[in-house]
């Protein structure tokens, strides 16, 4: 069984996946980039992130600049009919071992409307079909039972726990590791 990952991998591109448009962060207009930053800074979104501080415009711009020609991570804003739905990401991409870690957050205006499932489906298509990865991994705060249940409903399995791994608001938190293998 050979490695099927695209050897000429270029993450800095846009994709159409079903009825969604995945626009790489480096291709976003200033207005779109600010919308993404406002979603990320929303209390309901950042409450379950490792870095829960409010991201400044300058910090966000430095982050986006660091995505240019980066083969280890990619971030995309997801649009449907020009409406921003959320963000998906692949990080810690390992071409040799054919895996990446995923990230998802839904724009606050679309919470509790099934958008998370659409974002995850688009991300899996991107990872497994477009890039050719063998597996996806994720880390989630153990207290975020809603997210854990969501990932389990979508075929992810719990693979471990990192005890007292993240220091958040002065308290150490456990992180649940989950993963999914491409069965195709």
Image (cartoon, helix red, strand yellow):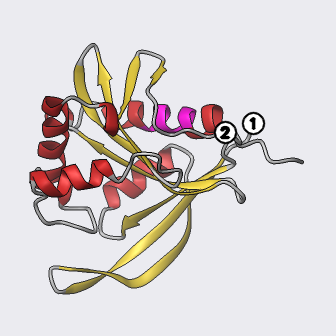
User: Which residue occupies the foreground of this view, 171 or 52?
Assistant: 52
Image position, residue 72 (x, y; %): 51, 55
User: Which residue occupies the foreground of this view, 174 or 9?
Assistant: 9
Q: Residues within 10 Å of mark 1 (few under 14, many from 20)?
A: few
Q: Give the answer, above or below, for where 139 lies relative to 172.
A: above
For label 1, the residue is 184
Q: Secondary structure at mark 1?
A: loop
Image position, residue 18 (x, y; %): 48, 17
Q: How far apart are the two marked residues, 2 and 1, measured between alpha carbons?
A: 21 Å
Q: Write the residue at 53% across / 50% down.
A: 71
Image position, residue 63 (x, y; %): 28, 54
Q: Residue furthest right?
A: 1
Q: Which residues are magenta?
A: 120-126
Q: Secondary structure at mark 2?
A: loop
Q: Which mark is residue 67?
A: none
User: Which residue occupies the foreground of this view, 98 or 13?
Assistant: 13
For label 2, the residue is 8
Q: Does the image show residue 166? A: yes
Q: Write the residue at 57% across / 46% down.
A: 155
Q: Which quarter of the figure is the C terminus placed in?
A: top right
Residue 124 belongs to the span the image colors magenta: yes
Could you tell whether 97 is left or right of 41 in the image?
Answer: right
The image shows a total of numbered marks equal to: 2
Residue 47 belongs to the span the image colors magenta: no
Q: Earlier in the sequence, mark 2 or mark 1?
A: 2
Q: Write the residue at 41% across / 57% down.
A: 148
Could you tell whether 71 is left or right of 47 in the image?
Answer: right
Q: Quadrant of residue 160?
A: bottom right
């Amino acid at each position: 069984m050979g490695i099927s990952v695209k050897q000429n991998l270029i993450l800095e591109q846009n994709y159409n996946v079903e009825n969604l448009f995945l626009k790489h962060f480096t291709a976003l207009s200033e207005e779109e980039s600010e919308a993404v930053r406002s979603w990320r800074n929303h209390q309901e979104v950042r409450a379950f992130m490792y870095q829960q501080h409010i991201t400044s415009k300058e910090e966000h711009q430095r982050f986006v600049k660091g995505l240019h020609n980066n083969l280890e991570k990619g971030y995309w804003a997801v649009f449907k009919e020009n409406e921003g739905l959320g963000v998906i990401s692949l990080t810690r991409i390992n071409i040799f071992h054919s895996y990446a870690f995923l990230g998802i957050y839904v724009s606050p205006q679309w919470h509790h409307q099934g958008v998370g499932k659409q974002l995850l489906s688009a991300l899996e298509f991107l990872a497994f079909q477009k890039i050719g990865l063998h597996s996806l991994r994720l880390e989630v705060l153990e207290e975020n039972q809603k997210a854990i249940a969501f990932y389990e409903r979508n075929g992810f399995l719990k693979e471990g726990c990192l005890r007292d791994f993240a220091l958040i608001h002065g308290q150490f938190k456990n992180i649940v590791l989950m993963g999914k293998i491409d069965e195709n």
